[in-house]
Image (cartoon, grey):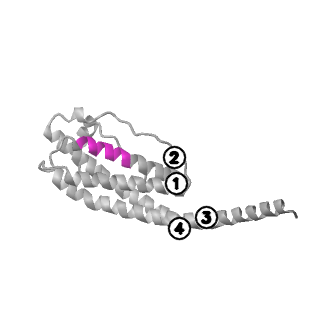
Amino acid sequence: MNETVLSRSVLAAHCCLTLVDSAPLRTHELTRAVDSAMSLARKILSDIPAAHEACVKATGLTLSSESEHLEYLLSDIGIPAPPLLKSEHLSLDVSLSRIVDGLELHHKLLQEIKELLTSTEELTLLLADITDLSAQVHKMQQLAQIPTESQKTTFPAISPQLSSDYHVQVAIHLCLQQLRSFTHDVFRSLRHIAASN
């Protein structure tokens, strides 16, 4: 065997070993990324009550209150529903893509409403948490080698429908309730991913 053939054989063997060694490493990194994402989801859930208390002053709009009587305003204001995450039969790429889309949706909604509020410190912290979780899920997509498309979530602006302070209060109330429900679904999805990994 001449030197060229020998060198190529050694290089090929090294590449194979690298690929074999990198698979468990990626799995370990993905597990750590899922754990970090779950921690961030818990942080969002723990920060929502403070943001609600600081931003929602209207009587009767508590975080735990039922919103059936406000459903007509939900459609009038034009608050979009987030992607569904309740099925455990979703593939990893679909789950992560829907999580990112839902987080981006709520970030845009809350950012728009924030411009109409006076007390925004707690909401700013919550928006930062949402950004951090979205970045972490993007990292999971990279580690899982899932191709991602840069697709911006678009929906009509809701601020033109917020014609009174009460409508602003209802909008932030409904958005935070929806974010809490969505984040619970995100946490369950992440837990399912962790168990399957």
Residue under the image location 23 percent in, 42 percent down: 113
Residue kind at label 4, given as amino acid type:
His
Which span of residues is magenta-colored?
103-113
Label number found at residue 28: 4
Task: Give the amino acid at mark 3.
Answer: Ser
Q: Main secondary structure of the magenta part?
A: helix
Q: Which badge, 3 or 2, is on the more N-terminal residue? A: 3
Q: Amino acid at mark 1?
A: Gln
Estimate the x, y position of residue 31 in percent, counting from the top left: 49, 66
Label 4: state its secondary structure: helix
Compared to residue 68, the image places residue 47 above or below, namely: below
2 or 1: tag closer to the N-terminus: 1
Is 28 in front, or is 49? 28
Tell me what residue is drawn at x 59 percent, y 67 percent: 24
Instruction: Evaluate whether residue 65 shows in this view.
Output: no
Q: Decide: is 167 above or below 193.
A: above
For residue 21, above or below residue 118: below
Q: Is residue 103 left or right of residue 93?
A: left
> Looking at the picture, which amino acid does disc 2 mark?
Thr
Residue 140, how many percent across, how many down? 48, 57
Q: How many marks?
A: 4
Q: Is residue 80 left or right of residue 141?
A: left
Mark 1: secondary structure: helix
